[in-house]
Image (cartoon, rainbow, N blue to C red):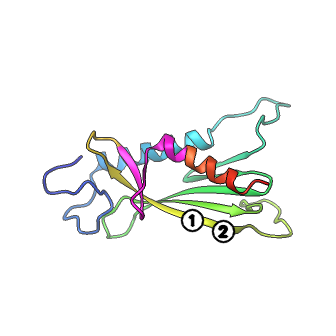
Amino acid sequence: MQDSEHSNDLTKTTRPIPPTLKERNAVQRSVERLLDELAPEKALRRGEAPPMQVEQHRTPSGCVLQAPTSAVSVSWFADTSQDLTHGELQVVLWRGVVTRRGATRPAKGAEVARELVLHPVERADDTLAWRAADGREFDSEALAVYCLELLETLQD
């Protein structure tokens, strides 16, 4: 994916050419791995209750992990503009219950406690990572662990 004229940051807006199909597919696979770690798409058998205290809700471009008093939402926004970037991943820690589309609204809405925006970057070993503005990098598995740790910070 990387040649001598490109930086390893896949989100730079100074790219002379748009991302390749191979690069876009690699980023999409990385997003899917993260979402599968956080909220796997699995069907429950009739009468089977989820074994977790955290409810997992999956959408085509993200997921919400809802605990009793907090939630984490992970949303992928692919870039469709002329900026020639891959897009961004938004991780939001919520205080309260997040309202999902079509669900009854709770009396008190959720409030944003923390937000993290990440961009895909290519590592030297040709794997993808997620880089935050502060320079922290996560692979998909480490980011899933971080999201669950965030969720625990507001549990009391």
Tell me the kind of residue under disc 1.
Glu
Quarter location, residue 115: bottom right
Q: Residues within 10 Å of mark 2 (few under 14, many from 20)?
A: some
**Residue 140 drawn at (x, y percent):** 47, 43
Tell me the kind of residue under disc 2.
Val
- 150 or 49, which lies in front? 150
Please name the residue shown 57% across and 50% down the image: 60
Residue 48 part of the magenta-drawn span:
no
Quarter location, residue 6: bottom left
Q: SS at mark 2?
A: strand
- 77 or 149, which lies in front? 149
Read off the magenta span. 128-144
**Residue 46 drawn at (x, y percent):** 82, 30
Q: Residues within 10 Å of mark 1 (few under 14, many from 20)?
A: few
Q: Is residue 37 visible?
A: yes
Q: SS at mark 1?
A: strand
What numbered label is drawn on residue 149? none
